Every structure is written in C-alpha cells, then in structure tokens.
Image (cartoon, helix red, strand yellow):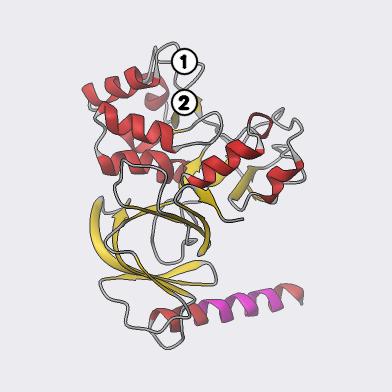
Amino acid sequence: MSHLVGLSEEVARLRRRVRAALGEEPADLVLRDCRVVNTYSEEIHAADIAVLDGRIVAVRDRFDGESLQEYDCGGRFALPGLVEPQFYPMLVGIEAAREALANGTTSVVGWGPGHNSASPDELGNVPWRVYGVAESGLPTGLRFTPVSLTEGLSFADGQDLLTPLRHGRTLMLTDTGNALPLLDMLADIVARALDTRHICLGETESKVYRPFLAALAAGVPLLRAVQMAGLNAATHYGINHEIGSLSPGRWADIVLLAELDRFPPDRVYVGGTLVASAGTPRW
C-alpha cells in the first residue's frame, strides 16, 4: 500500500510542475534574461528559467507565469552545474569543498571500493548533490543518492587516448597522475578532432572549473567543453535525466557567469537554492 501512496504523491508533484510550467501556479523562482548554455542542442540562447520544488519546469524565451521570487540575470550565461565524476572524500577537505561549490561544482559522484577513507564531518554539510555507485563505501556523513554502473571510468594517462574510446569506455581527464600534462592531452584531442562525447573532466579536489578552463585554453569548442564538465559524466552514470543540462525536469543546479571563462561565478544554485555568490559560499 505504501508504494501506492508514494506513486500518488509523485503524480501530484508532476501535476503541480506542469501547472507551474503553464503559468497556472506560481513558480518558486524565475531567473529572467539568461543566456542558456544548452548542452543538448549545442547552442546558447536567450531564455527565462522557471523552478519549482528544486526542479526546472520551464526554459523559454519569456516565462509569463507568476513566481514567488525572481532574479534578473542581466544577460548572464546560465551554465549547468559542473559534475565531478570521481569523488575522493579523503582528498577533499572542507575548504576545498567550499571552493569547489562556490566555483560551480554542484554534483559529485563517488565510485569504487576502497575509496571510503574517513572524511571531515563537515563535508556532509556541503549542499552539493552527491551520488554514490552501489557499494562504493562513501562516508556515512554524506547524504548521497545511489546509482549503479557496470563499467567505471578509464583514466587518461596521456599515452593512449584512443584505446579506451575504441573499447566503448568513457575517458576521464584529470590534472594529476598523468604521464602528460592535462593541457597536452587536451591539445592532442583537439589536434586529432576526437569526439568528446565520451570524455569527461575531473579534478583531485572536485574543482572542475580548472580542467574546464584548461579545455578552453587548449582550443576545445566551448559547448563541447561544457559537456565534458558535466553532461558526459552524467550520461555515463545514467543520471543525465537529473543533472548535466538546463532542461525541464532536471534539478535546478545553475551557474550564472558574466563571462564563460571567468570564475568564480556570480551565482551558484543547487536545487534552486542560492548556495554561493561572487565566490563566497552562503551556507
């Protein structure tokens, strides 16, 4: 019987979101006059973003419904929250986590056995979205959503980028532990015009903005770099229906920037809640 109650509640939530999208019920938040960086259509387009219950309910030229709160983005770029695809709690202290979140990392994914070393208690209070692959042994202080996966990420070592891609694996580029510097690997990807849809970016302390900026500096096209910093990892883990894009139904994890190559962002939202502004956490 409990599953029927849960289903009924979910249907009620979906109906409420549909009403808000149609302007028949106030949204919780509307971000007006954004330049949305769209990771699916690979374009940047003007739009308002409406949010209800932490989820995006509408992205369109002009949202004409009412809202409880509005923010005029003044033409700022709206970027999907960045995703750290290989989160190591033992390597990320509270200050590093605060910096990562304030610079746009809104989701992290912990993967693999043996990565369950103790982490500072405060880390569990960081208001980012935490996903854990089944049996990953993430610290109990972290509130995480379990995800399942049969294949992990292949770490690029700079010597052979093609083999894992040929084998249908997702390649992860990081800033440390490589035979070649990250910039050299990124330049090689650009020079060989490799398809980047199965390549994602990570950083030891989850500051994904760093390899994202490195990708831009190496000549990776902007929209492909944005995909590498979020959507590609979300797709690999099967959670792109929740994160990785600014689309209806996804969590309202939104990064607002005046310029796409300048960090920290003006504002960072997680689930429609403002968690950082101008590089300063608000929690």
**Residue type at numbered disc 2:** Thr
Amino acid type at mark 1: Asn
Residue drawn at x 49%, y 43% as measured from the top left: 83
How far apart, in angstroms, are the residues tagged by discs 1 and 2?
Answer: 8 Å
Observer-nearest of 160 and 105: 105
Q: Which mark is residue 178?
A: 1
| Count of labels in the image | 2
Residue 199 in view: no
Which element carries disc 1, helix, strand or loop?
loop
Residue 196 percent across, percent down from the top left: 32, 34
Q: Is residue 46 above or below residue 245?
A: below
- Res 197 seen here: yes
Q: Position of residue 254 (x, y in %)?
A: 43, 57
Q: Which mark is residue 174?
A: 2
The magenta stretch spans residue 10? yes
Q: Which residues are magenta?
A: 5-15
Q: Are marks 1 and 2 in contact (CB under 8 Å)?
A: yes
Q: Characterize the magenta stretch by its predominant secondary structure.
A: helix
Position in image of residue 155 (x %, y %): 49, 23
Q: Tell me what residue is drawn at x 29 percent, y 33 percent.
A: 216
Compared to 266, does 63 lie above or below?
below
**For this rendering, which residue is in front, 153 or 151?**
153
